[in-house]
Amino acid sequence: MYQEMQIRNYSPRSIQNYISQVSLVSGHFEKSPDQINLSELKEYLSHKIETKNLSASSVNQTISAFKILFRDVLGRDWNPVKIKRPRRPKPLPVVFSKEEISHILDGIINRKHYCLVALTYGSGLRLGEVIGLKFGDIDSDRMQLRVRGGKGNKDRYTLLSMELLEKLREYYKYYRPKTYLFEGRTAGKAYSKRSVQDLFKKILLQSKVKKDATFHTLRHTFATHLLEQGTNIRVIQELLGHRSLRTTSVYLHVTNFDPSKIKSPLDKL
């Protein structure tokens, strides 16, 4: 199964997650995964939903993992009718206002922490993307940031803030990171996701911004603020690395707009 996903160029994270899901089901039944049938898989998922409140995302991930195992590795027929995917809840994302972003950034004293948060917001990065950055990914001539191996193992380019570029240069001179743009205590080793998440919780507490936000809220805010500036939604889709425009369109529901500045199409006739 590992080889199959590797050949199909799945990201290392997806491979790890899928194999982990198969391993969990195998351990539950105490037998080899190739001996598990669809009825047992449904029984397992039902049990976990009832006892562990398993999310729709986790259920879908487990189904996808077994689809690869059954169809592509074991050569079995896969009948999607017999095991349907759950509907995912679609809550609107939490978004910071421009004033809240300014307040958060103004309260960060540490140079590295400031650059980490500012770059994530200013370029619309995922957590895994920002901690995987290297200085070679910064294209100061074109004012772009190269994101390597994003979700779906795709590369893309996104925006680089002119205001932040000088701060990044100062940060580099002061910290001299060895391999990654943002490193933890060990030279040459990237910041861990948990460390960044814990850091952002502390930054939010210090800022006294009262929102149920996470580090990923910075990415949501980037997209929403671009929409409010009038940026075309398809451009935002490319900057975020979304496969579907439907994913990007969720930000239309949280965008603030001034109706007085919008003219009816009737007035344009």
Image (cartoon, grey):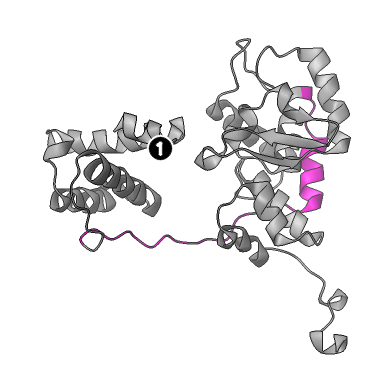
Residue 90: % across, % down:
50, 62
**Magenta region, residue range:** 82-111
Q: Is residue 214 left or right of residue 101?
A: left
Which quarter of the figure has residue 92?
A: bottom right
- The residue sitting at 83% across, 14% down in the picture is 173
Q: Mark 1 packing: few (<14 Cα in 10 Å), some, or many (20+)?
A: few
Is 235 part of what is drawn in magenta?
no
Residue at image coords 65%, 18%: 183
Q: Point out residue 62 in the picture as x, y percentages from the top left corner.
A: 31, 45
- In terms of depth relative to the viewer, which is nearer, 216 or 214? 216
Name which residue lies at 65% across and 48% down.
240
When asked about the image quadrant of residue 263, the answer is bottom right
The answer to whether any part of residue 210 appears in the image is: no
Magenta stretch containing residue 92, yes or no? yes
Which of the pair 93/173 is nearer the observer?
173
Q: Secondary structure at mark 1?
A: loop
